[in-house]
Amino acid sequence: MRVLILGVGNVMFADEGVGVHFVKMIENNFKFNSKEHNLKFVDGGTLANHLTPIMADSDYLIVVDCIDADGGQIGDVYFFDFEDMPKSINWSGSAHEVEMLQTIEMMDLVGDRPQTKIIGVIPRRIVPMSFELSDEIKKSTNLMEKIILKELSNLGFSYERIDDKGVQDMADEWKKEQF
């Protein structure tokens, strides 16, 4: 099985980039092994519908992105199967050109969507030209890490921690590489 971990978000808008930074953090901090499955990490940025071929080439997809949820608080983490998305969840308010929700729905229409799980977190701020993540987002990544490691273990992956960088470290590295 081909498993894709897709981080989505605009890294230049503070908390909005947490999906990208979180996926980079997991890829950096862990070594994964499976005799049966392949694992791929992708920084999807704000490409949304341009990611369709990459997403369709996987058998199992985990999308990490900012979401909004009725009654949710900043830093709240949600994990759900796309087919069973709670009615309280939406992707409104992100800085993506085309929302990931619409991209996944379009894939559904043509029958190209792999089995899809979502790890979503409610951001504090979406601030242009800021790479500083809020304390709530930084804290929420601890739970997000537990969720993704458990999900990958359930799929048959073993893992070993090889580093201990935080999500802000990844945001700082991205900024340093670009500027």
Image: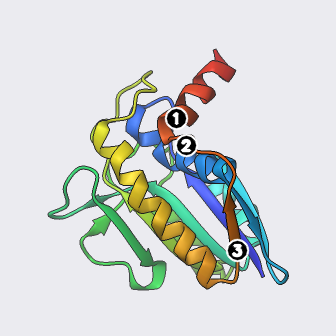
Residue at image location 74% in from the left, 65% down from the top: 32
Residue at image location 19% in from the left, 61% down from the top: 72
Circle 1: residue type: Val
Which residue is the site of mark 3? 158
The 10 Å Cα crowd at callout 1, few under 14, some 14 to 19, many 20 or more, is many
Q: CA distance from mark 2 to mark 3?
A: 22 Å
Can residue 170 be seen here? The reply is: yes
> Which element is circle 1 on?
loop
The numbered mark, 1 or 3, whose residue comes first in the sequence reads 1
The numbered mark, 2 or 3, whose residue comes first in the sequence reads 2
Q: Is residue 54 above or below residue 176?
A: below
Q: Marks 2 and 1: CB-CB under 8 Å?
A: yes
Circle 3: residue type: Ser
* Residue furthest top in the image: 179
Q: Residue 11, labelled with which disc?
A: 1
Q: CA distance from mark 2 to mark 1?
A: 8 Å
